[in-house]
Image (tube, rainbow, N blue to C red):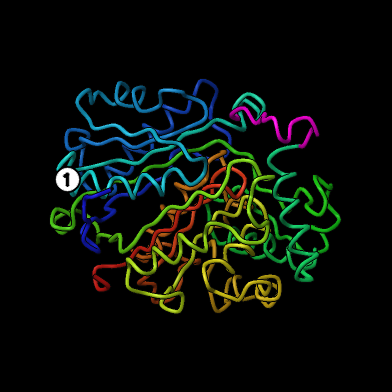
């Protein structure tokens, strides 16, 4: 895009979840989007009358933007319903920056909703058939991520025990989060002995299947100064797509996060060592390992050793997925919105027992498809602008 967005010129001023877990009968994805929007607006002291931009996506509503605009009674709102899977909402933040900078809108909401648990995965997922892989009858998406995990194990000596440490760390964070779905401790042995889904991934290496939704409110930094809560500024953002089908992924051990991270860091004017808290799309345990490597928190091939040392668990050197992540907090199909909600709360200091110490800069990374679409956003408090 030719529109230039100044570092920190856009701010997230509201963040909220809708109902999570398994919602009451009759709730649909647009209901959950709207619920999240109203709560996020209340979070920042604005109302529906202030909103003139809508960014949303869901696999359960083909015309999600039109449906949400109708539901909220905003017929003149600027709409963007671009879907890149779970990374969609980070992409929406990137696009909302441009929309606000260009004057297309002043107050934008980013929203998601899904009733994946209530309806069942087969009724809520987009078609996964493709001519390259479907004849081999893979169980997607777990088979695709298992392929990446197996390659990482072969190439770098990563072990199943190390992958299990990702799930254990996520559960330890979830136990500090009252809204998390999982409420019982988890051990490495329990991860390894649980039902195998697609080798080397057991069911505890895989994300939850829940209902839920959430929303953000964005506006200009100038307007954000006069709102209810401290603004969280967008310091840098980038998006990279490498493939759609896992069989076309250039390298099973290197994701587009390497490039999206480089671009986001450059635009934010920081590096990995400046980051205080990290929120990564952990649909599967291998994701966390790959993204930690590709985003520069450890060297390629050393992610297994890094997570096994307790670095990402509560009390570790790098707080990662502090709400419990998709593995233990919630995962209604397209998880990216929840990464952003948690990052905003961490930078505001609102997370209670799971609060990262002295958090001023957060890195948020979303993943869509089967390691296909990668979005990285660097967020910061007012003091970092």
Report the number of numbered marks: 1
Position of residue 56 measured from the top left corner of the image (x, y, whole percent): 38, 35
In the picture, which quadrant includes the C terminus? Answer: bottom left
The question of residue 127 being in magenta is answered with yes
Position of residue 19 measured from the top left corner of the image (x, y, whole percent): 47, 38
Q: Is residue 254 left or right of residue 35?
A: right
Tell me the SS state at disc 1.
Answer: helix
Q: Residue at x 44, y 67 (%)?
A: 262
Residue 368, by quadrant, is top right
Q: Residue at x 52, y 72 (%)?
A: 296
Q: Residue at x 22, y 30 (%)?
A: 77
Q: In front: 321, or 100?
A: 100
Main SS, magenta residues:
loop
The question of residue 131 being in magenta is answered with yes
Q: In front: 172, or 206?
A: 206
Other-residue count near label 1 (Cα within 10 Å), few / some / many at <14 / 14–19 / ≥20: few
Q: Is residue 174 left or right of residue 70?
A: right
Q: Is residue 25 left or right of residue 237?
A: right
Q: In front: 328, or 157?
A: 157
Q: In front: 7, or 11?
A: 7
Residues shaded magenta: 125-138
Q: Which residue is mark 1?
A: 102
Q: Is residue 60 above or below residue 385?
A: above
Q: Is residue 210 left or right of residue 235?
A: right
Q: Is residue 205 above or below residue 312?
A: above
Position of residue 327 measured from the top left corner of the image (x, y, whole percent): 64, 52
Position of residue 357 measured from the top left corner of the image (x, y, whole percent): 43, 76
Q: Residue at x 54, y 61 (%)?
A: 321
């Amino acid at each position: 895009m030719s529109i230039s967005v100044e570092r920190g010129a856009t701010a997230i001023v509201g963040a909220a979840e809708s109902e999570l877990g398994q919602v009451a009968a009759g709730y649909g994805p647009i209901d959950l989007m709207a619920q999240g929007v109203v709560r996020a607006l209340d979070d920042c002291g604005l109302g529906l009358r202030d909103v003139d931009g809508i960014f949303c996506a869901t696999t359960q509503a083909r015309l999600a933007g039109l449906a949400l605009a109708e539901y909220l009674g905003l017929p003149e709102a600027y709409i963007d319903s671009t879907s890149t899977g779970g990374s969609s909402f980070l992409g929406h933040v990137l696009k909302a920056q441009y929309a606000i900078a260009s004057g297309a809108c002043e107050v934008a909401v980013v929203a998601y909703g899904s009733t994946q648990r209530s309806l069942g995965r087969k009724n809520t997922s987009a078609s996964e058939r493709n001519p390259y892989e479907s004849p081999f009858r893979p169980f997607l998406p777990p088979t695709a991520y298992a392929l990446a995990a197996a390659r990482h194990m072969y190439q770098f000596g990563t072990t199943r025990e190390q992958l299990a440490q990702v799930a254990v760390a996520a559960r330890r964070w979830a136990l500090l989060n009252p809204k998390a779905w999982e409420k019982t401790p988890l051990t490495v042995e329990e991860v390894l002995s649980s039902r195998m889904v697609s080798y080397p991934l057991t069911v505890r290496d895989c994300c939850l299947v829940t209902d839920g939704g959430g929303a953000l409110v964005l506006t200009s930094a100038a307007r954000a100064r006069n709102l209810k809560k401290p603004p969280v500024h967008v310091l840098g953002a980038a998006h990279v797509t490498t493939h759609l089908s896992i069989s076309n992924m250039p390298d099973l051990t290197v994701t587009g996060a390497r490039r999206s991270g480089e671009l986001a860091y450059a635009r934010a004017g920081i590096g990995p060592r400046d980051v205080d808290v990290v929120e990564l799309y952990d649909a599967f345990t291998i994701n966390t390992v790959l993204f930690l490597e590709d985003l520069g928190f450890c060297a390629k091939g050393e992610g297994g050793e890094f997570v096994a040392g307790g670095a990402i668990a509560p009390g570790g050197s790098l707080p990662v997925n502090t709400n419990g992540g998709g593995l233990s907090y919630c995962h209604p199909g397209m998880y990216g919105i929840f990464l952003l909600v948690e990052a905003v709360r961490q930078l505001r200091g609102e997370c209670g027992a799971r609060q990262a110490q002295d958090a001023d800069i957060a890195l948020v990374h979303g993943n869509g498809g089967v390691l296909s679409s990668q979005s990285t956003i660097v967020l910061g408090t007012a003091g970092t602008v």
